[in-house]
Image (tube, rainbow, N blue to C red):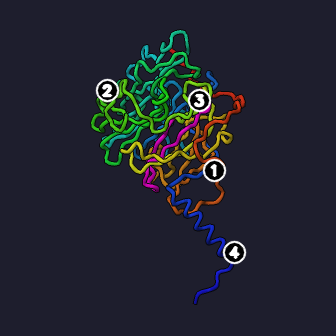
């Protein structure tokens, strides 16, 4: 027998339908508070650094051990039985070409091959880009290791901006151009490795977040094998080629009121069966953080398939308005990392996590206790001058060793 539906029940039912209609737009991510934790990072009392993080923190598994890298001009490694029990003291790793190396190296991404070989990719900041100025123009290089990243062999620079794209008269505090602040992930078939890159070209039509790729089979000899996405094709060379951004600037990187997404970190989400990218939004030449954004794509092969970035965390919730958001999965049995996560993972920003990030399919109920952001879309800056804020980025230009 059908029972009468009361007015309150009707209202609840209608609200549920509205919620389902909103959720049906596509998969999304939401945030809730969690017990605070910090990655080991780099601790150096002489430099007054404690658990310091200055880029993405890539991690991988070897047997029952999890390894994680943190960099501050040079990469350091920590390990442990899982994410929650990493050794708080990181060890300095070594390169085969450290002597007289110019530019520093920040390991931003890693990939563990089936044969045990560990591949890594670094952000480099060469000196003397703009004579008389501390500005640099980052490049991306490749390395390989047979001992889980304690010792690296440098394979060379594989991604670089065109030489004529440098703008030394920029008001930008750090970069006059370049390609850097990136992450790397293979496709599901391991046919290609995909690079999600920040680009600082002098031409705003080539600024923002862009994509390049390399055949997986070329990973041992990568120089000259990477190709950038430009006008719908993968034909521009990694060294000096042009790009078409998937997310361009609202305001030019080389303007005082710059407004640009940057610093992508990417993972494959097993719950959504999608690729998920987190991004920073800089709102001026000093890289003042506006907030953390998420974008989702069904197919990494399609650079145009990324969803409109949605704001998931406002800068006001961050300590000192930090950068470098990334997801790290917590399921050790599933060997989750910064490149693989499930429905619930930890959200880190600059190596600190006070949040869980929850990924929802269309139609899934939103859990209780979520943090809410009034503004969910990438927004243009207001005409009002932003309040002064202490800048915490420490990349003050490379130093020769």
Residue 152 lies in the magenta-colored region: no
Element on which disc 3 rests: loop
Closer-to-camera residue (318/70):
318
Name the residue carrying label 4.
8
Q: What residue is drawn where x is 64% and y is 84%?
A: 4
Name the residue carrying label 3.
258
Q: Are marks 2 and 1 in contact (CB under 8 Å)?
A: no
Using the image, determine if residue 355 lies above or below residue 23: above
Name the residue carrying label 1.
34
Using the image, determine if residue 377 lies above or below residue 150: below
Q: What residue is drawn where x is 69% and y is 28%?
A: 390
Task: Check disc 4: other Cα within 10 Å, few if <14, some if 14-19, many if 20+.
Answer: few
- Residues at marks 4 and 1, CA–CA distance in whole angstroms: 34 Å
Closer-to-camera residue (6/341):
6
Q: Nearer the viewer, mark 2 or mark 4?
A: 4
Q: Earlier in the sequence, mark 1 or mark 3?
A: 1
């Amino acid at each position: 027998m059908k029972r009468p539906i009361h007015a309150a029940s009707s209202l609840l039912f209608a609200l549920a339908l509205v919620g389902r209609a909103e959720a049906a737009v596509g998969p999304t991510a939401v945030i809730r508070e969690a017990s605070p934790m910090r990655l080991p990072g780099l601790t150096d009392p002489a430099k007054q650094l404690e658990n310091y993080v200055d880029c993405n923190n890539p991690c991988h598994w070897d047997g029952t051990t999890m390894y994680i890298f943190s960099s501050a001009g040079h990469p350091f490694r920590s390990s442990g039985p899982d994410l929650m029990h990493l050794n708080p003291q990181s060890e300095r790793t070594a390169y085969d070409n450290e002597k007289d190396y110019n530019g520093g190296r920040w390991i931003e991404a890693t990939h563990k091959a089936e044969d045990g070989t560990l591949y890594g990719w670094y952000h480099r900041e060469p000196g003397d880009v703009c004579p008389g100025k501390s500005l640099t123009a980052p490049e991306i290089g490749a390395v390989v290791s047979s001992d889980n990243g304690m010792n690296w062999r440098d394979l060379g620079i594989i991604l670089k901006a065109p030489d004529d794209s440098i703008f030394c008269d920029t008001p930008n505090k750090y970069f006059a151009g370049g390609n850097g602040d990136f992450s790397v992930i293979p496709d599901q078939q391991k046919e290609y490795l995909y690079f999600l890159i920040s680009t600082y070209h002098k031409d705003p039509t080539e600024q923002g977040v862009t994509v390049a790729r390399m055949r997986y089979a070329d990973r041992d000899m990568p120089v000259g094998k990477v190709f950038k996405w430009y006008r719908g094709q993968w034909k521009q060379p990694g060294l000096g080629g042009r790009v078409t951004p998937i997310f361009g600037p609202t305001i030019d990187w080389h303007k005082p009121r710059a407004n640009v997404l940057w610093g992508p970190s990417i993972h494959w989400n097993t719950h959504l069966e999608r690729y998920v990218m987190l991004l920073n939004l800089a709102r001026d030449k000093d890289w003042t953080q506006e907030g953390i954004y998420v974008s989702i794509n069904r197919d990494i092969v399609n650079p145009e398939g990324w969803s409109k970035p949605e704001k998931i965390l406002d800068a006001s919730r961050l300590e000192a308005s930090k950068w470098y958001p990334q997801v790290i999965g917590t399921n050790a049995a599933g060997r989750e990392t910064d490149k693989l996560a499930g429905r619930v993972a930890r959200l880190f920003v600059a190596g600190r996590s006070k949040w869980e990030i929850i990924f929802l399919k269309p139609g899934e109920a939103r859990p209780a206790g979520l943090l809410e952001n009034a503004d969910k879309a990438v927004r243009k800056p207001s005409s009002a001058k932003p309040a002064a804020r202490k800048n915490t980025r420490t990349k003050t230009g490379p130093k020769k060793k």
